[in-house]
Amino acid sequence: MKILVGVKRVVDYNVKVRAKSDGSGVDIANVKMSMNPFDEIAVEEAVRLREAGIATEVIAVSCGVSQCQETLRTALAIGADRAVLVQTDQELQPLAVAKLLKAVVDREKPQLMILGKQAIDDDASQTGQMLAALCGFGQASFASKVAIADGKATVTREVDGGLETIAVKLPAVVTTDLRLNEPRYVTLPNIMKAKKKPLETLTPADLGVDAAPRLKTLRTVEPAQRKAGIRVPDVATLVQKLRNEAKVIS
Amino acid sequence: MAALVLAEHDNLRLKGATLNAIAAAGRMAGEVHVLVAGHQCAEVARQAALAGGVAKVLVADAPHLGDELAEAVSEQLIAMAAGYSHVVAAATSFGKNVLPRAAARHDCAMVSDIISVVSEDTFARPIYAGNAIATVQSPERIKFVTARPTGFDAPPAASSAAPIEAVAVVPDPGLSSFVSREVAKLDRPELQGARIVVSGGRGLGSAENFKLLEKVADRLNAALGASRAAVDAGYAPNDWQVGQTGKIVAPDLYLAVGISGAIQHLAGMKDSKVIVAINKDADAPIFQIADYGLVADLFEALPQLLEQLG
């Protein structure tokens, strides 16, 4: 069984992003870029399934600029077997990425596709569900536990108010939540090995996909800033303020 | 043109977040319809019919729609979406799971997690953990949108119930099946929608110490929340996590105890009306957004707080 994993290059988790003052977008010139944290969990899960003998091959796919090769090399260092970059300088929105991934799925015929539940840049949380719909597959989003057996994936999902377990026929799409696993540290020998693993580069045109953006961002601004309030000296003052000033408790 | 709102429910009760989605839809289109897809869900339809601004409730009732599975519900939605200018759901784990499927099948881009409606085709939504707000215009013929519940006040109840109509059920695509559910027992208000949230961080130090917070929450009839650090450390269950990748809340009062205030956490609570922070580190970032800050050892402050609350 092949597993296809989607990985996105995003602004690093620790960078505090700011909107540009002219409203034209966010300022991400010269900031550190990394693999989307949820995608790292996706790669780790796929590699574990291969190590457990359930999967035979893990293919990491990224869509975007040529620097996404670095992100794919990280996926290869975690343990993916080979990588595919769908290279374009165009802005890619979730629907376009889902179409590009579907085209790769049509070529590779994986039984399982694992993606992050959301990217920490656009926070859209759409791509995995869209990929499943376009392929006509079932989906298990926000997964915290995945078991593969008898042609189906039994997945525990993190839903509002608790956990839900569903069974999905393979092929299927799984999107990862935070606590599915803890990705391993990438070691130097594995980084060296990753450099020798195959990385194929395609374009949206090669795949016959129109990846043009549909949604238009008119402006991007800073959110309304909250001002720091006051410090209270003790609990008694706090409770008095909440009762009489803020009037939020009785 | 009308907007279609996808109702979220457990076949008995309409979830509160659906009311927020109905309010959002009302700002997009002149008429709002609600789709209740479920099994033996007549009571949910009755509740939806009483929400202010709803012109019609459409009910698809069948066994395979009873478990809110994305594949089955989205097929129903796909079949019904074509006649609408907007298809709207709350940006909850259910809405996020179902709506992208329907949007993709209609070859329409989707706008996630909006916090305001600028015009019928233009919406504001947070990006980068709420560090920027993007105004996005959609040219799509059907605008698929999820609305952040905290961005839209629930409409007042209607004076008379909207008509309820049964619709043809789309067959089960047979891709998935429900196995089990572990729903946390709700002897407290739900985190999303609670008027007061009491939230703990790594400062609590153990799951045992979270019980101190539970006492405060019980006294205030508050929901319990946690930072990612506290959940990762095993002090609190996953579904308590407030933040960019957890739940987004905006209660009247958010009481942050032993939470330092990472940007990802602030993304989930900074629209709360009043924020209180109790932390022993006077330099903790949470104090920069707190209306009332108390620099104190929480193990001394919490018992005092309980005593003062009476």
Image (cartoon, coloured by chain):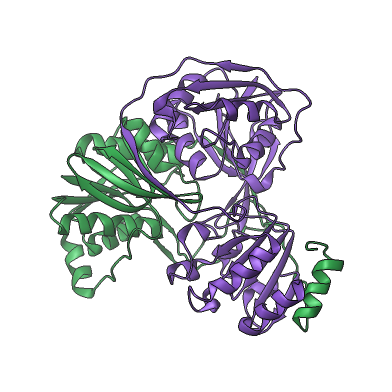
Q: Residue at x 47, y 66 (%)?
A: B231
Q: Nearer the viewer, residue B277 or B185?
A: B185
Q: Is residue B61 left or right of residue A243?
A: left
Which quadrant of the rendered structure holds the N terminus of chain A?
Answer: top left
Q: Residue at x 48, y 22 (%)?
A: B61
Asked if one can make out residue A58 in the rendered structure from this viewpoint, the answer is: yes
Q: Quadrant of residue B50?
A: top right
Chain shown in green: A
Asked if one can make out residue A64 in the rendered structure from this viewpoint, the answer is: no
Q: Is residue A58 left or right of residue A30?
A: left
Q: Nearer the viewer, residue A202 or A181?
A: A181
Whether residue A27 is situated above or below residue A140 in the rendered picture: below
Q: Residue at x 18, y 73 (%)?
A: A189
Q: Quadrant of residue B97?
A: top left
Residue B59 on image: x %, y %: 54, 21
> Total label count?
0
Q: Is residue A3 left or right of residue A127?
A: left
Which residue appears farthest toward the right when viewing the image?
A244
Whether residue B304 is situated above or below residue B210 in the rendered picture: below
Q: Is residue A131 left or right of residue A94?
A: left
| Chain B, chosen colour in render | purple
Whether residue A2 is situated above or below residue B242 in the rendered picture: above
Which quadrant of the rendered structure holds the C terminus of chain A?
Answer: bottom right
Q: Residue at x 36, y 44 (%)?
A: B180
Residue B110 on image: x %, y %: 52, 36
Whether residue B178 is situated above or below residue B185 in the rendered picture: above
Residue B133 on image: x %, y %: 63, 51
Q: Nearer the viewer, residue B297 or B221?
A: B221
Residue B225 on image: x %, y %: 57, 62
